[in-house]
Image (cartoon, grey):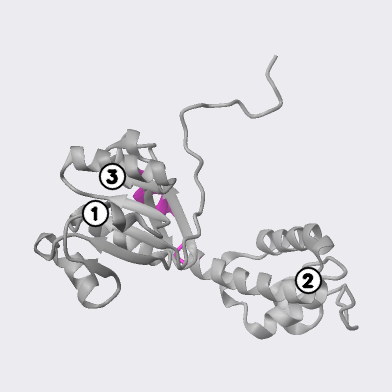
């Protein structure tokens, strides 16, 4: 008899959106792989320190240093570099040194990624598509990074051109809604109402939604209705709530 619950498929990773804003990330190495890692963590607003002799930096990493986007320690790695670090990204062509760095990270309980050595990684980097606030990651759990890149491009090619802008407008509306209905007990209703907006409005309509449209639309939150964009702009939608918000 088939179970009504999802079947467990072992061997996967827990894919999360890791918030590392203002966290201290240590990148060991200054080559092409390090350059890619640096872009990833800078996009997440991390504070980045690179440990590598300046002579070993490729052009892109050198640019990040010169632009003061990252701090450079112009020398080889030392254990003291791990003090105060939240994450370590190791990208050096020295397997023995990489293993020693990973062991030190484990002792200090610092999450680490050792490039191209899956068994010595607490997490993997996937292939990411970015469109404004929208991020889509494809991971092969270390089996085939190039294949992940191919799958990511195929997925990106199927997305509407305006999906990123639509996500951004929905985010603004959601923040406004939290101000209108801040109470914790309103959480389920907020989620249900926002779901209705996303389901009933097209991506084009979400992109076109102005600040004025949002303010008008929020008037329909209390009765729990979602009028069309045209109705919002014409002020003809049924169920409008004209009184003060007393949540």
Residue highlighted by disc 2: 182
Q: Is residue 53 left or right of residue 232?
A: left
Q: Is residue 93 left or right of residue 37?
A: left
* Residue displayed at 47% across by 37% down: 13
Q: What whole-number distance in Å separates the C-alpha atoms at marks 2 and 1?
A: 48 Å
Q: Is residue 152 magenta?
A: yes
Q: Nearer the viewer, mark 1 or mark 3?
A: 1
The quadrant where residue 170 appears: bottom right
Residue highlighted by disc 3: 101
Residue highlighted by disc 1: 78
Q: What whole-number distance in Å separates the C-alpha atoms at marks 2 and 3?
A: 46 Å
Q: Earlier in the sequence, mark 2 or mark 1?
A: 1
Q: Is residue 221 left or right of residue 233?
A: right
* Residue displayed at 17% across by 69% down: 62
The quadrant where residue 138 appears: top left
Disc 3 secondary structure class: helix
CA neighbours of label 1 inside 10 A, class few (<14), some (14 to 19), many (20+): few
Q: Nearer the viewer, mark 2 or mark 1?
A: 1
Q: Are marks 2 and 1 in contact (CB under 8 Å)?
A: no
In depth, the one of 211 and 20 nearer the eye is: 20
**Residue stretch in magenta:** 150-162
Disc 2 secondary structure class: loop
């Amino acid at each position: 008899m088939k179970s009504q619950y999802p079947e467990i498929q072992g061997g996967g990773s827990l894919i999360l959106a890791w918030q590392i804003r203002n966290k201290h990330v240590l990148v060991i190495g200054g080559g092409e792989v390090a350059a890619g890692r640096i872009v990833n963590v800078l996009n997440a607003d991390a504070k980045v320190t690179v440990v590598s002799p300046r002579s070993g930096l490729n052009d892109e990493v050198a640019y990040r240093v010169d632009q003061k986007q990252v701090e450079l320690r112009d020398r080889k790695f030392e254990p003291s570099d791990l003090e105060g670090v939240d994450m370590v990204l190791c990208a050096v062509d020295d397997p023995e040194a990489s293993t020693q760095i990973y062991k030190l990270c484990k002792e200090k309980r610092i999450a680490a990624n050792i490039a191209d050595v899956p068994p010595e990684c607490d997490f993997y980097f996937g292939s990411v598509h970015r469109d404004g606030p929208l991020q889509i990651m494809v991971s092969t759990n270390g089996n085939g990074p190039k294949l992940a890149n191919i799958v990511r491009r195929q997925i990106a090619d199927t997305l509407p051109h305006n999906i990123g802008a639509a996500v951004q407008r929905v985010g603004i509306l959601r923040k406004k809604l939290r101000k209108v209905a801040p109470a914790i007990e309103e959480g389920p209703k907020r989620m249900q109402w926002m779901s209705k907006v996303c389901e009933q409005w097209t991506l084009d309509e979400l992109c076109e939604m102005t600040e004025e449209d949002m303010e008008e639309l929020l008037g329909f939150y209390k009765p729990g209705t979602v009028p069309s964009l045209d109705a919002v702009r014409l002020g003809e939608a049924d169920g409008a709530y004209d009184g003060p918000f007393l949540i």
